[in-house]
Amino acid sequence: MPQKMVEKIEEIAEGSDDGLCDVIFHLKSQDLTLTHVVNAGGVAFRNRSLVTSATELLPPSLEVLRERQPRTIRRKTDRDAEEPSFASTIARAPISASPLEETIARNYDRLATAIASAALRPSVERVKDRTKDRFRQYRPAVLWSSESLRVALRRDDLLDLRQRTDFLASLNDVYPNQQVGVPRYFSPARSSAKVQGELSRVAWGVERVGAPAAWGAFGHRGAGVRVAVLDTGVDASHPDLKGKIKGWAEFDGSGAQLPRSRPHDTDRHGTHVCGTIAGGGHSGQFVGVAPEAEIYAGLVLNGRKGGTVAQILAGLDWAIEQRVHVINLSLGGRTLERVVRSPFHRSLFHAASIGISVVAAAGNDGSQTSGTPGNDFFALAVGAVDVKDRCAGFSGGGTHLITESEHIGPKLLPLAYSKPDLCAPGVDIRSTVPKEAWGFLSGTSMATPHVAGAVALLRSACQGFSDLPGFRQSSVIQDIILATTFDLGERGLDHRFGFGRVDALRAIDAASGWVTDTSEYRDRRNRSPVAPPSARGRLGRLPGIGPADPGA
């Protein structure tokens, strides 16, 4: 392992053109829970590839999950080893997650000790002397959820670390703190006549994922659910977002939070994403899937120059500390390799450990490409479809590999898994943009908030999830969202559509039965969840929405 760290350090040093190397040191995990969770997920992902009906992913009943005792899966003949449900395998894993406050304190202490070590402290001091008044942008950052350090070092000092075998032995990986651009998106000069003409007040994507029908059938619109949006910021004064931005933070390229920042959007990307999650109502337009959800906006990308990996990791730290229910990541860096290296992996693990669902874009570079963190093991990755349920040509996806891991057992390696996990409307999406306007944008960034909004609706309508501990809670929600998709493309999981298009109405219907009536829920495992008979009839009576679209 130290030799691999040496090679990565040399690669980063060679890529530096100004004598200073901006580096993220990712420390080895000391948490056995991560090992158990990753192995449980590996079993589920391996079995998932053979599933031809998404309903097979439905988790065991709430009653069974509460009673199931943890144990390690050892034999292939074990009933649980054959289940594709993430919740099933998680329930069998010997997990004992620490309270969030303890995890934060433990990781901070460990990372602060690493910065003060003989391997790094002298180098940090030399950078401070060299940069003087500019040191603020080069000072070290402790990124607790990823268990990593962002440190700027002189090239010579970085190369000298090759001799510090004790320090290298403590590392899991080394990454450059590289730039992450604002995701590429397309703004059509004119949208399709169908989208503009037939669905003039309700955005077609909101209609297609079953949100208005779910509002009418179950009477919930996302109230009480907190959704973090890490993006280019948000125009909090927009009439369809006013009063919905409950939290705000801005981070610079070093990962430091700016203390006097106020909500603003450096582009229009972030405002558009926030609108698709929670926009609508005040103007009479309905562009948000969960219009009563609360938005916690983190500015981690500058519209003019993008952001950095450390910036996004710092935003994830903040979002997890806010104890949000959902994190929306309509961002990422392009990946062409099948072998996944993700600096975000540990952050997504810690989010899942307290029940947070992380929804991320699959990327906009077409088939057989992907974006990180969307291709991460723990992310719920989203591809894009158009108004006719055709996969957008730009939508990313493919098979990914984990060939070596300090956590995954050798019997599961190499582990192959497919992304995206599901798809959502992402072409000609109407939503909020700055300066009290609305606009059409296309991209997997636009598809992702439809899924985040669907998760928010599911959580607001079904309170029984709160009875489950963190990992079981996040895994059950993921299973239900995937199990209730509308299958598109090849039967089962595929590279273009995942398991299919998200459907909030079907998800809430399935979850409501699962939470309240376990015997009825068990009967659902052999049939697709459908809307209650009254759902579409009630939709026509919702004020300000108009009649239901029979094709939704």
Image (cartoon, rainbow, N blue to C red):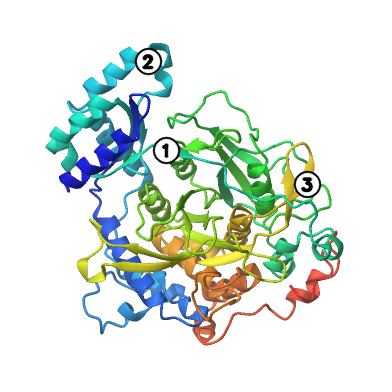
Rendered image quadrant of residue 320: top left
Contact (Cβ within 8 Å) of mark 3 with mark 1: no
> Mark 2 or mark 3, which has the lower sequence index?
2
- Label 3: which residue? 438
The Cα atoms of the two marked residues, 2 and 1, are separated by 20 Å
Is residue 386 positioned above or below 238 on the image? below
Q: Position of residue 322 (x, y in %)?
A: 49, 42
* Of the two numbered discs 2 and 3 in the rendering, the one whose residue sits closer to the viewer: 2
Q: Position of residue 504 (x, y in %)?
A: 63, 67
Disc marking residue 178: 1
Disc marking residue 131: 2
Contact (Cβ within 8 Å) of mark 2 with mark 3: no
Residue 259 lies left or right of residue 74; in this view the side is right
Q: Judge the density around disc 1: few (<14), some (14-19), many (≥20) Cα neighbours within 10 Å.
A: some
| Res 53 visible | yes
Residue 346 lies left or right of residue 264; in this view the side is left
